[in-house]
Amino acid sequence: MKRIEMNNPAALMMATLLTVSLSPAWAQGDMNHQSMPASTDAEMEDMDFSGMKMSDMEQPMDHSMDHGKNGMMQGSMQGGSAPADARDPHAYSDGYDFGPIPRPRLADEQNFASLLVDRLEATRSDDNTTVAYDLQAWYGRDYDRVVLKAEGEANSGKLEEADSELLWSHAVATFWNTQLGLRYESSEEGPDRSWLAFGFQGLAPYWFELDVTAYLGENGQSALGLEVEYELLFTQKLILQPRLEANIYGKNDPKLARGSGLSNITAGLRLRYEIRREFAPYIGIEWAGKFGDTADYARAAGESEDETRGVAGVRFWF
C-alpha cells in the first residue's frame, strides 16, 4: 500500500474527516480530545487518496433534517409556510382588525382648542389712556384648524376700533401654516370694512414669530399686514419681547384717514415675568408712527403723526 501524499490538500482533508468520523468519542458527542484515539501509520497506509482531486470533494451535501410534525423549522429556516398559530405581523397596523378593542386614535386625529391673549394692556400717552387687546384662538387638528384673530382699542369705555379675522389654517411645513378667510373691521371714525384675507403664519429661522397677511377689500381696496415678534430670555421666567407691526395699503381711503403705501408702524418692547407659563404680567414702552398720506391726514386733523407711550398689562393662555 502506498503512503498518503501529504502535499495533496484534497487527500489530507479527506483523511482528517474519515479519522474523526470513525472515532467512537466523536460519534457519542464527547468533545474531550484526550479520549479520541490517534490514527496509526498502518491505518493511514490503507488509505490511498493520491488520485483524488479537489473537485471530488466539492459534492453537494445533504442538509435535510427531520423538522418535526409542526413544520416549524421548515417554515422559519427555509422560507416555507408559517405555522397555523403564528402571529399576524400586520395585526396592529392601520386598517387591520384590532379584535375586541377599538382602534386607537392618534394625536393628529383628535380636535384640540387653545386661546392666547398676547396683549391685554393699558396704554398711556401724553394726554390719554386707552385699553388694547390682541388675542388668537383656534380649534381643530394639527394640520387643519379654524383660527380667530381679534384686536382692538377702547377709550373711555367705548370700543373705538376692532379688527376680527376668521380663518381656515392648514399646515404646509413643520413650523408654517397658510391661512384663508374673512376679515371684518369696524371703527368709530368711519365706515366698516370687509376683506378677503390670505396669508401665512409661523416660526422663521432664528426663532422669529412671523405673521403676514394680504387683504382684498371693497372698491378695489388692498392691504398687507406684517407682525414680527421675538422672545429674548434673560432667565426661564424673565423674558423681553420686541414686537414690530406695519400696515401697507394699495390706495387712499379718506374716510378712514389712510393713505396708500406704508401707512403706519408700531414698535415696542415688553418685559414680562412668567409667574406660570400660562400667566405673565408685563410692562413696556411702545412707539407708533404714521407715514406718507396717512401722516398728512393726521396733520390735517390736528393729530400728531407719531407718539411714544408706556404700556402695562398681562399675557395669558390656556
Image: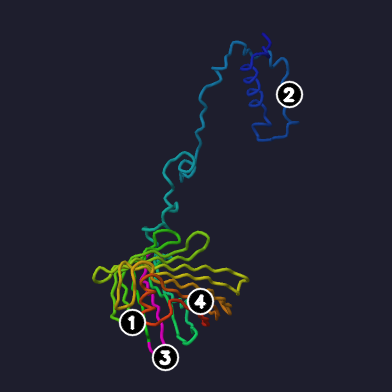
Q: Name the residue under label 3.
A: 156
Q: Where is residue 106 in the image (x, y as percent from the top left)?
A: 42, 65
Give left or right: position of 161 versus 194: right
Please state which of the two labelled residues, at mark 1 or mark 2, is closer to the viewer.
1
The reply to whether residue 249 is in sight is yes
| Mark 2 burial class by Cα count in 10 Å: few <14, some 14-19, many 20+ | few
Q: Distance between the residues labelled 1 and 2?
A: 111 Å
Name the disc covering residue 187, or none: 1
Magenta segment range?
A: 142-158
Q: Is residue 148 magenta?
A: yes
Q: Name the residue under label 2.
A: 38
Which residue is nearer to you in this view: 66 or 62?
62
Name the disc covering residue 286, or none: 4
Position of 137 relative to 97 (above/below): below
Element at badge 2?
A: loop
Label 2 sits on what residue type? Ala
Element at badge 3?
A: loop
Q: Distance between the residues labelled 4 and 1?
A: 22 Å
Magenta stretch: dominant secondary structure: strand
Residue plotted at (62% across, 20% down)? 14
Label 4 sits on what residue type? Glu
Please state which of the two labelled residues, at mark 4 or mark 2, is closer to the viewer.
4
Label 3 sits on what residue type? Ser
| Mark 4 burial class by Cα count in 10 Å: few <14, some 14-19, many 20+ | many
